[in-house]
Image (cartoon, coloured by chain):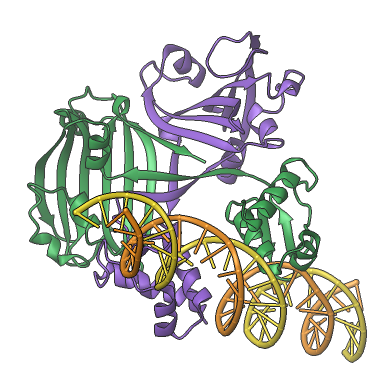
Chain colours: A green, B purple, C orange, D yellow
DNA sequence: TCCCCTCATATGTTTAAACATATTTTTCAT
DNA sequence: ATGAAAAATATGTTTAAACATATGAGGGGA
C-alpha cells in the first residue's frame, strides 16, 4: 500500500511532466490541494516539500508555489574513501607515504601556525591509482602534527575525526604535470581526473586536498 | 531566531562530531530526545530526518537509530544547461549543428524503431566549449525525428519536454580521440572532461549523450 | 504618480494524539 | 533446546489545530 503523500507527490509530478502545470504555473494552495485529495494539509505539504527539494517547484511565503524552470540537472554524487572503492572492486589496496613536511603560513589557506603538507600514493593491484596531495591547517588541527601517516592515509585519519561544517569539492580534468606524471607512472600531459576538496569548520579552514587519478582508472557515476 | 528543529539537529550533529555519540552508537529514542529537549516528538523527528537524509545516522523500525559509518563523501552536484552556464559567466554563447542521422536499431540502447544521432558543438566566445554527441530513441520520442536542431540544441529541446524518471550520469577524464580533437580544436590526446548521461522513463531508454569539454575550460564545483 | 503603511494570505513551524508497520524480544508448546 | 506464536516497542504516517513569518496587494496621503 503506497503512502498517501507519495501518491500525491507522484500525481503532482505527473501534472508537471504532462504539461497540465507548465513551467511558471502557480499551483493551488496547500489547503486547496488538501481538499482536492481529501487529506490533511500536512500530507500535501510533505509531498510538496519533496518536489521543492528536487527543485521542481519554487515556494515563497505569501507568493505561493510555482513550477520551476529546470535549468540544471542536479544529482547526488558519492565519492567513496579511496581504499574502500578499490577493495569494493575486489582489487588489492596499497598505500605509500611519499612526503611529509611543515611550512609556515604562506598561502591564503590556513592560519599563522602554518600547514602540514602530506603527499601520498594509493595503489590498486600495485598500480598507482590516486596521488593525494594534502595540506592540513595546524591552527585548526594541531594534533595532526603528531599523527603517523606512514600506515594510514591522512584521508582516513581525518574522516575518523572530521567535524566539518562546509565542504567544497571541485571536479576537473587536466594533463599530468611532470611531478604528477612521475608519481602516477604516466607520461607528462597524460589525461588525469582531479578531485579537489576544501573543508571548513564554521568558516575556519581545516584541510584541502588534491587527488589526481589516471583518467583510464577513475570515473564517478550517479543515479537519479 | 533559529528554528527549534535546526537547533536540535545541530546539537545532535555536534554530539556525533565530538564523539559523544561514536560510530555505531544507538541514540536515544524519539520520545526520550523529545523529553530531553523539551519539544514534541515531531520536532525531534524532523531533526533526525535531516541527519538520516545526510547519511549520518541509520534508522530502522523497532531497532532504533544508530550513528552510521561515514564511508563516502556525498554532495549534491548541479550541472547547468551548457548555454546557461556560458551566459552566466558573461561569455557569448554559440551553437553549431554538425551532424544528424538516423540509424536502425543497432546498439543495446534503444528499441526497434532505431536511433536519432545528433552531433553538435557549443561555443563560448567562439571557442569550442562542448561537443555534444547524442542518441535519441525513436521508439520513445518519435517526435524528435521532426525537430529542427539547427537552431536549438537537443539538450535544450529535450529539457523542455523531458519526463525522465531515472538519470544515470558518469563523469570521467579522457584523452581526446582524433574525432573529438578535431571538433574541439585540440590536439589528439589532449585532456578532456567527459560527461555521459543516460535517461530513462519507467525503465525505457529515452536518450543518451556524451558531452566532451576541453579540460582547461570545464570544471564542476559543489558546496556542502 | 509615487511612496509608505497596513492588512491579508500562503507558506513555515510546532504540538499532540492516534494509528500503522517492521522487527526484536519474550513466551510457550513441543 | 528449538521453533513458532504472541507481545512489546521504535520508527513511520496522518490528522487537526494553533501560531509565526515573509511578502504581495491595496489604500491613503503628499
Q: Position of residue A15 (x, y in %)?
A: 75, 46
Q: Residue at x 66, y 59 (%)?
A: A48
Q: Which image quadrant is residue B135 in? A: top right
> Quick check: B62 above or below B98?
below
Q: Is residue C19 above or below residue B80?
A: below
Q: Is residue B3 left or right of residue B104?
A: left
Q: Is residue B177 above or below residue C26?
A: above
Residue B59 as seen in the image, left or right of residue A137:
right
Q: Residue at x 47, y 17 (%)?
A: B180
Q: Is residue A39 visible?
A: yes
The residue closer to the viewer here, A131 or B136, is B136
- Residue B30 in the image: state x and y as whole percent: 43, 74
Q: Is residue B53 left or right of residue B90?
A: left
Quarter location, residue B200: top right
Q: Is residue C15 above or below residue A177?
A: below
Residue in the picture at 49% in, 21% down: B184
Residue B126 picture location, percent across and down? 57, 28
Residue A106 visible? The answer is: no
Percent across and percent down for residue A204 are: 31, 66
The residue nearer to you, when weighing B184 against B157, is B157
Q: Image quadrant of residue B16? A: bottom left
Q: Is residue C2 left or right of residue A149?
A: right
Seen at 58% across and 45% down, the residue is B88
Count the labels in the image: 0
Amino acid at each position: 500500500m503506497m503512502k498517501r503523500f507519495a501518491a500525491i507527490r507522484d500525481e503532482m509530478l505527473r501534472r508537471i511532466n504532462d504539461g497540465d502545470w507548465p513551467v511558471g504555473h502557480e499551483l493551488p494552495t496547500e489547503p486547496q490541494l488538501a481538499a482536492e485529495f481529501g487529506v490533511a494539509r500536512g500530507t500535501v505539504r510533505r509531498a510538496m516539500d519533496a518536489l521543492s527539494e528536487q527543485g521542481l517547484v519554487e515556494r515563497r511565503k505569501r507568493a505561493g508555489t510555482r513550477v520551476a524552470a529546470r535549468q540544471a540537472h542536479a544529482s547526488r554524487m558519492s565519492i567513496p574513501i579511496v581504499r574502500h572503492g578499490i577493495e569494493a572492486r575486489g582489487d588489492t589496496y596499497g598505500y605509500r607515504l611519499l612526503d611529509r613536511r611543515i611550512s609556515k603560513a604562506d598561502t591564503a589557506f590556513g592560519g599563522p601556525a602554518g600547514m602540514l603538507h602530506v603527499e601520498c600514493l594509493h595503489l590498486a593491484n600495485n598500480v598507482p591509482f590516486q596521488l593525494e596531495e594534502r595540506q592540513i591547517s595546524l591552527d585548526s588541527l594541531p594534533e595532526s602534527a603528531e599523527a603517523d601517516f606512514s600506515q594510514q592515509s591522512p584521508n582516513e585519519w581525518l574522516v575518523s575525526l572530521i567535524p566539518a561544517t562546509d565542504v567544497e569539492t571541485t571536479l576537473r580534468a587536466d594533463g599530468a604535470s611532470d611531478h604528477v606524471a612521475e608519481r602516477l607512472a604516466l607520461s607528462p600531459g597524460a589525461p588525469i581526473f582531479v578531485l579537489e576538496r576544501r573543508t571548513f569548520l564554521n568558516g575556519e579552514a581545516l584541510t584541502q586536498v588534491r587527488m589526481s587519478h589516471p583518467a583510464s582508472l577513475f570515473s564517478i557515476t550517479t543515479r537519479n
